[in-house]
Amino acid sequence: MIEFRLDRGSGVATYLQLVHQVKQALRLGVLRPGDRLPTAKEVVDQLAINPNTVLKAYRELEREGLVAAKPGLGTFVQRALGGTSVTEHARLRDSLGAWVTDARAAGLDAEDVEALFAAVVLDKFRVGEETA
């Protein structure tokens, strides 16, 4: 089951942080079709937020067809995101982990790594769009 966390200083609305975390968990295979999301009460107790915030996030996920509420049972994942298998994700994660280790050994800090990674991703996907 997913465990939500908040970055209160991010400037991103709380409900959107929840939505993004569910989507990330779906992309990484942490959540799969049939899995139950925590109840609104569980999330409220964990994060000390308004129940309507949780319900708004869950409604957004439902509107996108990612989850479905089953009265009396909970909210369940309907479909996954991402185009690769969990095994492929694990392989890529290991490869990226080795790259981050190399970057740290070269003296880069977390912000340097994030900036470099973001630049490469944008560059590679921009190239991919031009050739598609």
Image: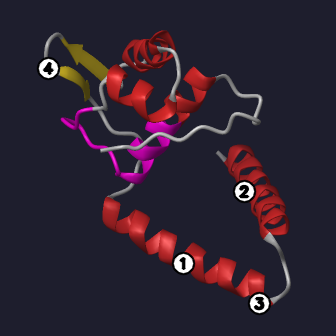
Considering depth in this image, is 44 or 66 the residue closer to the camera? 44
Q: Earlier in the sequence, mark 3 or mark 2?
A: 3
Residue 95 is labelled as: 1
- Label of residue 105 in the image: 3
**Label 3–label 4 contact, CB within 8 A:** no
Residue 48 appears left or right of 25: right
Instruction: Find disc 4 in the rendering and name its residue.
Output: 73
Q: Indicate which label's residue lies in the foreground, 1 or 2.
A: 1
Mark closest to the chain's N terminus, 3 or 4: 4
The residue singled out by tag 2 in the image is: 121
Cα–Cα span, label 3 and label 4: 49 Å
Q: Nearer the viewer, mark 3 or mark 4?
A: 4
Magenta region: which residues? 21-36
In which image quadrant can residue 76 be found?
Answer: top left
Q: Earlier in the sequence, mark 4 or mark 2?
A: 4
Identify the element where label 3 is drawn.
helix
Disc 4 or 1, which lies upstream in sequence? 4
Amino acid of disc 1:
Ser
Cα gap from disc 1 to disc 3, whole angstroms: 16 Å
Residue 61, percent across and down?
Answer: 42, 21
Q: Residue at x 47, y 39 (%)?
A: 4
Does the magenta run of residues contain 66? no
In this rendering, position of residue 69 left or right of residue 11: left
- Residue type beneath disc 3: Ala
Q: Nearer the viewer, residue 132 or 101?
A: 101
Give the percent coordinates (x, y) of residue 71: 17, 10
Dot 4: element: loop
Mark 4–mark 1 Cα distance, whole angstroms, equals 39 Å
Q: SS for tag 1?
A: helix
Q: Is residue 118 above or below residue 34?
A: below
**Amino acid at pointer 2:** Val
Q: Is residue 32 left or right of residue 25?
A: left
